[in-house]
Amino acid sequence: MKLNKICLFIILLFISYDFFSQEDSKNYEPLPYSYKGISLGMTLDETKIALIQTPEFGYNGDRDVSLVPGDNQILIETDTTNNLGSPFLTQCWFQFYNEKLYIMTINLNKNKIDYYSMFTTLTKKYGEPTTLDPQKTVWESDDIILILEKPLSVKYIDKKTYEELKNYTNVQISAEEYTRELFLEEF
């Protein structure tokens, strides 16, 4: 009889835990696709305008824009170290593919914010991370990847574009490896 009561108690405990954990997950916000009015998917021109209107990034105009080696990739790099932006930010990078923003990297000032505070804030807001290791914490949804990296940066990634580019890169590497093998066989 005692065994049945213990089993019943354990079952009720698991059911209540599952119920409350589902309730907690309903309160989490969806992963963000924007920061300070700059959103993944914006065009290059839209992002430039938004950066000008948001002085926290320390954007200096077109001289902060450069081409990334590769196809159709552009990078905007901003820097707040000259006291031109937020004291909480240092450098920020905005990466484009086919003139659409697909990665935002926000580097935070380690003298003003610490990793644990950011981790705690993001976990309270977006729930438990998808993966956690000593170098980074990752939250993922169907469309967005949010990464908190050490020493202290936050990345917003358009998952679909990122996966597309990653698959393209893997195909290129395989072709290079194949060509290398053909070259070596010539000897």
Image (cartoon, rainbow, N blue to C red):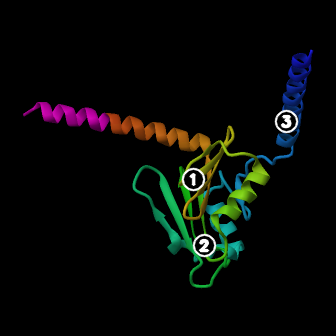
**For the residue marked with disc 3, what is the amino acid?**
Gln
Judge by depth and name the residue closer to the eye, 90 or 64.
90
Judge by depth and name the residue closer to the eye, 169 or 31.
31
Quarter holding residue 187: top left
Judge by depth and name the residue closer to the eye, 146 or 175.
146
Q: Are marks 1 and 3 in contact (CB under 8 Å)?
A: no
Residue extending farthest to the front is 2
Badge 2 or badge 3: first in the primary sequence:
3
Residue at numbered disc 3: 22
Label tally? 3
* Residue at the image point whose x is 67% and y is 71% from the top: 113
Q: Are marks 1 and 2 in contact (CB under 8 Å)?
A: no
Secondary element under disc 3, as helix, strand or loop, is helix
Residue at numbered disc 2: 110
Quarter holding residue 15: top right
* Residue at the image point whose x is 68% and y is 46% from the top: 129
Badge 1 or badge 3: first in the primary sequence:
3
C-alpha span from label 2 to label 3:
35 Å
Q: Residue 175, image x and y in percent?
A: 31, 34
* Residue at the image point whose x is 71% and y is 73% from the top: 53
109 relative to 11, above or below: below
Crowd around label 1: few <14 · some 14–19 · many ≥20 (10 Å): some
* Residue at the image point whose x is 61% and y is 73% from the top: 109
Residue 126 colored magenta? no
> Which of the numbered marks, if any, corresponds to residue 136?
1
Secondary element under disc 1, as helix, strand or loop, is strand
- In the rendered view, does 114 fall on the left or right side of 12? left
**For the residue marked with disc 1, what is the amino acid?**
Lys
Magenta highlight range = 175-187
Crowd around label 2: few <14 · some 14–19 · many ≥20 (10 Å): some
C-alpha span from label 1 to label 3:
26 Å
